[in-house]
Image (tube, grey):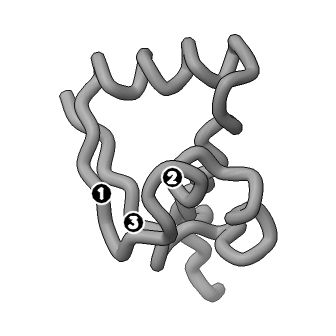
Amino acid sequence: MTTRIDCDTCVVRGLACHDCVVTVLLGPPPELMIDDDELRALDVLADGGLVPPLRLVQPVDGPQVESA
């Protein structure tokens, strides 16, 4: 499985970019694909204090509300 990192859709873009591993390592890319092994490696580096954690917050669909 891969994780799609699209900074353009990140809910906290601008607010958390300065403390996100993607920005620290690569600058703000338009989109990045990393697999599960790479994501685990980034988590290990962040847990060790070597890089900031991934701050990606993806939007979720809200509940479907129908009018009466």
Determine whether, in the image, residue 6 is placed left or right of residue 22: left
State the CA–CA distance, disc 2 to disc 1. Answer: 9 Å
Q: Specify few, some or many for label 1: CA neighbours under 10 Å numbering under 14, 14-19, or 20 or more.
A: few
- Do the numbered discs 3 and 1 sit on residues whose CB atoms are within 8 Å? yes
**Label 1's element?**
strand
Residue extending farthest to the bottom is 67
Instruction: Please report the residue visible at 60 percent of the width from the left and 65 percent of the height from the top.
Output: 62
Q: Vertically, is 37 above or below 23?
A: above
Q: Position of residue 7 (x, y in %)?
A: 48, 69
Residue 30, given in percent of the width and then of the height, sits at: 36, 75
**What count of labels does the image hold?**
3
Give the labeled residue for mark 1: 32
Instruction: Find disc 3 in the rendering and name its residue.
Output: 6
How crowded is the residue under tag 3: few (<14 C-alpha within 10 Å), some, or many (20+)? some
Q: Secondary structure at mark 3?
A: loop
Query: Disc 2 residue type?
Result: Val
Residue 55: horizontal and vertical position, in percent? 65, 48
Element at label 2: helix
Q: Which residue in the structure is indicated by mark 2?
A: 22
As displayed, is residue 47 above or below residue 1? above
Label 2 with label 1: CB-CB less than 8 Å: yes
Camera-near label (3 vs 1) is: 1
Quadrant of the snapshot with the C terminus: bottom right
Q: Amino acid at mark 1?
A: Leu
Depth check, front residue: 58 or 7: 7
Q: Are marks 2 and 3 in contact (CB under 8 Å)?
A: no
Q: Residue at x 58, y 45 (%)?
A: 21
Q: Report, in whole angstroms, how far the alpha carbon at label 2 lies from the one at label 3.
A: 10 Å
Q: Label 3 to label 1, Cα distance in Å?
A: 6 Å
